[in-house]
Amino acid sequence: MLLAIDSGNTNVVFGVFEGDRFVKAFRCANDPKRTADEYIVWLKELMALNDLDIDAVTGTIIGSVVPETGFNLISLCRRYFPGDPLVIGEPGVQLGNEALIERPEQVGADRLINAFEANRTYGGPLIVIDFGTATTFDVVDADGNYCGGAIAPGIKLSLEALYMASAKLPMVEIAAPPTYIGKETRTAMQSGIFWGYVCMIEGMVERLRGEFGAPMKVIATGGLSELFAEKTAVIERTDRALTLRGLAEIYKRNAKI
């Protein structure tokens, strides 16, 4: 079995693969203080609850955008699993695409992985929208290369900032209210947050397509991708396992080098 680890700003997601088959994903809050020993106790128990044998893991791969967490995840893999993990961004690890931007070293591993896997699965050119801590729009050309994009605050981050910075506004759930015009504070906030994000998504897609100068598919991933895909036609497909599948495919390709 392969253990693919996606370490984002908010969560760490562990994906289990048997050959090409995605089996299960487990997630926990990303805490840089969590040690390798703490990870293995948590992961072993969850895998056992799902009838998965942790001793059957024969390879590991890590994509991390949080360096402090990345160190402990590498320690986890080296201490408890066979061999060294494959780490996205390390010399010699080949992704099969390029970052065609001014500062390639600044691109998060998750954005390169998503560009690679979205092109492999759906074919470029395309736009990948990732609903995470930040909402990112990644532009991918017909060869699967990462061509740049846009970064906006994630919807949860925006909602929390609105709540923290105001004296009288409550914390509300992220949901699509039935009307655009809120008749009281809660629905007015939901309208501004939810439908405001829908407008941003539609506007950004239109502008990115216009600047790129060619038709582009739009694929969404991340925890809230399905919620927004239900309310806007610009999102053609949702794929919550996109990053994990990309990690698994990159591992397989590098194992053959």
Image (cartoon, rainbow, N blue to C red):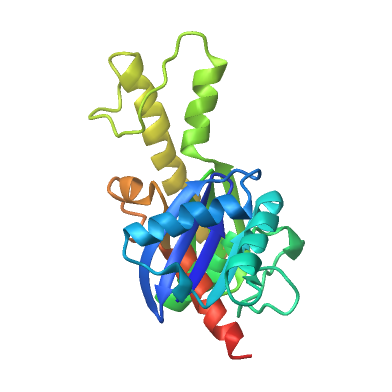
**240 left or right of 71 in image:** left
Q: Is residue 146 above or below residue 138?
A: below
Q: Position of residue 100 (x, y in %)?
A: 69, 69
Outermost residue, left direction?
178
Q: Is residue 127 above or below residue 199?
A: below
Q: Is residue 6 above or below residue 144?
A: above
The residue located at (60%, 56%) in the rendering is 149
Residue placed most toward the observer, 34 or 90: 34
Q: Is residue 125 above or below residue 128?
A: below
The residue located at (53%, 70%) in the rendering is 247
Q: Position of residue 74 (x, y in %)?
A: 66, 63
Q: Position of residue 191 (x, y in %)?
A: 35, 28
The residue located at (45%, 51%) in the rendering is 27
Place residue 89 in its image quadrant. Answer: bottom right
The residue located at (58%, 61%) in the rendering is 111
Outermost residue, top direction?
168
**221 left or right of 5 in image:** left
**9 left or right of 17 in image:** right
Residue placed most toward the observer, 82 or 220: 82
Which image quarter is the C terminus in?
bottom right
Q: Position of residue 35 (x, y in %)?
A: 63, 50
Q: Is residue 240 visible?
A: no
**149 left or right of 203 in image:** right
In this rendering, the count of numbered labels is 0
Residue placed most toward the observer, 190 or 67: 67
Residue placed most toward the observer, 106 or 84: 84
Q: Is residue 49 visible?
A: yes
Which image quarter is the N terminus in?
bottom left
